[in-house]
Amino acid sequence: MGINFRHSVRSKAAWSYSGFNIFRERLARQIGLEPVAMADWGGDREWPDPKQEPIIHLLHHSDCDDVIAHAHCAAVAKRLRELVANWDHRDYDRQAALLLAESMEEAAAARSDLDFC
């Protein structure tokens, strides 16, 4: 049981729920956010504007349903690639993040939302 993303047959980004949570916490810290301080993650601090920081569309999102709108996918994919670029090439989170970015790019090109399932 875990989280998968439905858009591409080729790209198979997947995490366990706990692994996805840890991955998103890593990303949040990388942009200077403390996850437990954020609204909906246990705290009351407001999330930054996703227009200024596109990765917020991924961070402040349900971990098991809903979509990332195709209109946001290209910007989120680009930012995700930037954030994981210096992570170890053997790091599972980096490898899965690149697959997720690929799915987001395909979703944007196809004008099809990226489903969390």
Image: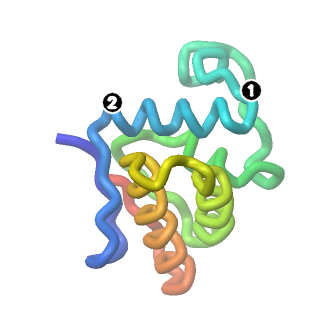
Image position, residue 35 (x, y; %): 60, 23
Q: Amino acid at mark 1?
A: Glu
- Residue 50 located left or right of residue 42: right
Image position, residue 64 (x, y; %): 34, 43
The image quadrant that residue 47 belongs to is: top right
Name the residue carrying label 1: 46
Element type at mark 2: helix
The image quadrant that residue 19 belongs to is: top left
- Residue 79 located left or right of residue 91: right
Which of 44/93 is in front?
A: 93
**Residue reaching furthest right?**
52
Element type at mark 1: loop
Name the residue carrying label 2: 18
Q: Earlier in the sequence, mark 1 or mark 2?
A: 2
Image position, residue 54 (x, y; %): 70, 54
Q: Amino acid at mark 2?
A: Ser
- Residue 64 located left or right of residue 74: left
The image quadrant that residue 48 belongs to is: top right
